[in-house]
């Protein structure tokens, strides 16, 4: 005569199996393709016009710099004060202007080394979508945007490594880049 399992044993077994299946699917999804950001169309920006900064432009108006690497990456041009989000095929999917800090990285290849959802910047401004790429002269260099969407205040002699973005561009960069995403810094 076979022994019957109590109902609690069946429920426990089914729950454990379902949990294992969900975890397996989550791990599989985490290793899948990442979405790419949409192309930004030119449009006026309240913070841009108030602070004399140009609004984001489409990739057709601003060509990806030569020698900026290959594959999926973030490209940051020091001279143009501009960032491009580049998909795996090498096509720029979005580009926008930035406000660089007083400390900049040297041209070269980097990667996103850490991310923080939000914190207070070294200039005292509440920031979000913080993506660290390197340290220069003891100063962390990171992309971020102010919570209120404003441009950074004058540095007043401070060493600041924050590369500030418009709020919508900060959200797009955050969605595009994860830890270990390649970052190419060009002149």
Image (spheres, rainbow, N blue to C red):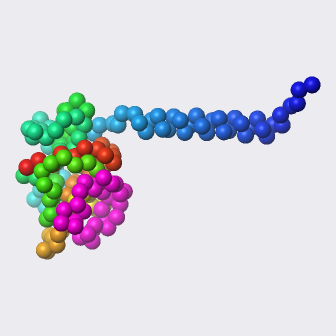
- Against 43, residue 137 (above or below) is below
> Range of the magenta residues?
113-140
Q: Position of residue 22 (x, y in %)?
A: 56, 37
Q: Residue 71: which quarter of the image?
A: top left
Point out the residue furthest to the top here.
1
The image quadrant of residue 101 is bottom left
**x and y percentages locating residue 83 in the rendered image:** 17, 47
On screen, residue 143 versus residue 116, left or right, reads left
Q: Can residue 133 be found in the magenta stretch?
A: yes
User: Residue at the spot x=13%, y=40% of the render?
Assistant: 68
Residue 56 coordinates in the image, percent (x, y):
16, 47
Please say whether residue 48 is visible from this viewpoint: no
Pick the front one: 77 or 151: 77
Q: Nearer the viewer, residue 60 or 160?
A: 160
Q: Residue at x 30, y 52 (%)?
A: 113
Residue sitting at x 22%, y 49%: 110
Residue drawn at point x = 43 percent, y = 39 percent: 30
Q: Main secondary structure of the magenta part?
A: strand
Q: Is residue 43 above or below residue 50?
A: above
């Amino acid at each position: 005569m076979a022994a019957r399992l109590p109902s609690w044993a069946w429920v426990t077994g089914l729950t454990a199996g379902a949990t294992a299946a969900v975890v397996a699917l989550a791990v599989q999804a985490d290793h899948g393709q990442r979405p790419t950001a949409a192309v930004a169309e030119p449009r006026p920006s309240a913070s841009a016009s108030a602070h004399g900064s140009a609004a984001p432009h489409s990739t057709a108006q601003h060509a990806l710099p030569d020698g900026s690497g290959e594959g999926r990456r973030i490209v940051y041009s020091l001279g143009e004060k501009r960032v491009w989000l580049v998909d795996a095929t090498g096509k720029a999917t979005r580009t926008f202007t930035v406000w660089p800090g007083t400390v900049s990285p040297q041209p070269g290849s980097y990667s996103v080394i850490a991310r923080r959802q939000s914190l207070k910047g070294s200039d005292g401004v509440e920031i979000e979508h913080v993506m660290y790429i390197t340290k220069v002269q003891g100063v962390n260099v990171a992309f971020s945007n102010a919570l209120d969407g404003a441009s950074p205040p004058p540095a007043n002699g401070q060493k600041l490594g924050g590369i500030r973005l418009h709020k919508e561009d900060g959200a797009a960069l955050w969605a595009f880049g994860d830890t270990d995403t390649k970052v190419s810094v060009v002149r």
